[in-house]
Image (cartoon, grey):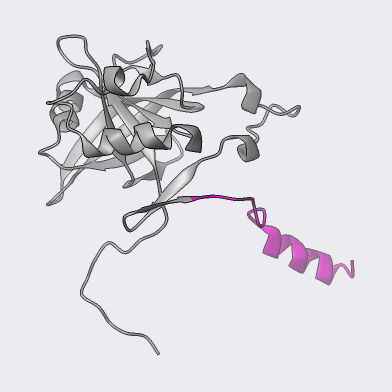
Amino acid sequence: MKIERKPSPLLYPCPVVLVASASQGGRGNIVTLAWVGVACSEPPIIGVAIRSSRFSSGLIQKSGDFTVNIPSVEILKEVDFCGAVSGRDADKFSKTKLTPSPAKRVSAPIIEECPVNLECVLKGVHKLGSHDLFLGEVVATHVDDELINEKGEVDYTKTKPFVYVQGQYWGLRKPIARGGFSKEAKTREKLGR
């Protein structure tokens, strides 16, 4: 039996990322976000939802770009801090000791401690209500070399990402299946394998 509840964004889990932006004075800012997702594969576009009142919202709209930095569990405390404190009140790079590095194609910095970094050019902002949806085209991707396996692919077992589920951070343990496995199983059945 299902229980109907009032409408809410009860989508879970949500990936946790650090979005970095550049400011006019040169000091970068970081905001922790969990309402993030792939919006398009060709061209590659990432969507991030940010409250218009957030410091990062104005910075991204002024600069026209941002970076999406995927953290690992090793920097969970820093990630949580970047979501709990406003960049108007604190230099988050200084407070967390996270390392900003120049990006190759955008003005926003990438965060060295994050194993994967996506440089994004702002393609549009859609005002939705409590949040604005920022769409960024990925123009460069950086991956720590120790994450690349012998086939040249990212070894996700080494990335140690985590997700956000209704107020809590959750870790990920291991893959449980590869996408398309059900079709492969049916094909094997049909072939008598």
Residue, x 38% and y 14% (percent of image)? 103
Residue, x 28% and y 17% (percent of image)? 94
Residue 167 position, x and y percent, is 31, 55
Occupied quadrant, residue 6:
bottom left
**Residue 170 in sight from this viewpoint:** yes
Between 143 and 29, which is closer to the camera in this rendering?
Answer: 29
Residue 122 position, x and y percent, is 26, 28
Residue 93 position, x and y percent, is 30, 19
Q: Quadrant of the N terminus?
A: bottom left
**Residue 135 in sight from this viewpoint:** no
Q: Quadrant of the C terminus?
A: bottom right
Between 148 and 157, which is closer to the camera in this rendering?
Answer: 157
- The span shown in magenta is 171-193
Q: Name the outermost residue toward the right.
A: 193
Reply above or below: 182 against 71: below
Residue 178 part of the magenta segment: yes
Residue 85 position, x and y percent, is 20, 34
Reply above or below: 115 against 15: above
77 sits to left or right of 183:
left
Between 42 and 115, which is closer to the camera in this rendering?
Answer: 115
Reply above or below: 186 against 92: below
62 sits to left or right of 19:
left
